[in-house]
Amino acid sequence: MKTDDLINAISADTQAARAPINWIVWGGVAVGVVLTALLFSMLLSVRPNFEAALGDWRFLMKWAFSLTLLTTAVALTMRLARPQWVSDTTLLVLLGAPLVLMAGIFAEMLTLPANYWLPTMVGDNALACVIYIPILSSLPLAAMIMALRQGAPSRPVVAGATAGLVAAGIAATFYATHCTNDSPMFLGAWYLLGTAIVTAAGALLGAKLLRW
């Protein structure tokens, strides 16, 4: 076999191997969404003024944050699921969601007097946010870990943490429809704390379950 033919064959095998794990990861995401929807319907409900909230940019900012987190984490998870080294530079894709959040916080600070900043950040019922985001994340995190076990992550701790970010993105998207605190400052304090808890749990699970 000529060298060029060998290279083309290896390239074709590599491309063929990528498709299944991508589908498995997307399957994990889909299962996670369905399970979170079921769990959400059992534990919580959509806020009464949901339709009115759709006209408030601060509410939409919550979805902008959670969906950006979800999509960037899914993209990175598909890279991490393969037996190839993923550099720290590649992880910078995860800065998308924090940048969206920072833009929202800055915009709110421009329109809100400084003496309202702290009360707005504290909000009301923050504890529920910190509790329910991890709870709603539990099933999609399990689904993502199971999906990653079908691959061969070279960085299992990072892969597990990214699975946690996927799960938190799904959970936060659902929880945003229930939560009546729409301030980006509140989001930056309590949604991030809930997300950090899920990410840490994912890293721990990755360390134990994703090594090969």
Image: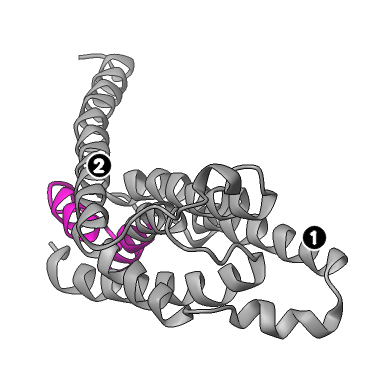
Q: Is residue 165 above or below residue 51?
A: below
* 92 sits to left or right of 57: left
Q: Which residues are drawn in magenta?
A: 140-165
Q: How is the image coloured?
A: one colour
Q: Residue at x 71, y 59 (%)?
A: 104
Inter-mark Cα distance, 2 to 1: 35 Å
Q: Cβ–Cβ below 8 Å for labels 2 and 1?
A: no
Q: Residue at x 27, y 74 (%)?
A: 201
Q: Is residue 1 among the parts visible in the rendering?
A: yes
- Callout 1 crowding tier (Cα within 10 Å): few <14, some 14–19, many ≥20: few
Q: Quadrant of residue 26?
A: top left
The stretch drawn in magenta includes residue 24: no
* 150 sits to left or right of 189: left
Disc number placed over residue 25 in the picture, else none: 2
> Could you tell me the amino acid type at mark 1?
Ala
Q: Which residue is mark 1?
A: 107
Which is more foreground, mark 2 or mark 1? 1
Q: Residue at x 36, y 70 (%)?
A: 199
Please state the horizontal and vertical placement of residue 167, each as a whole percent of the image: 32, 57
Please state the horizontal and vertical placement of residue 108, each as a whole percent of the image: 77, 64
Q: Residue at x 19, y 31 (%)?
A: 20
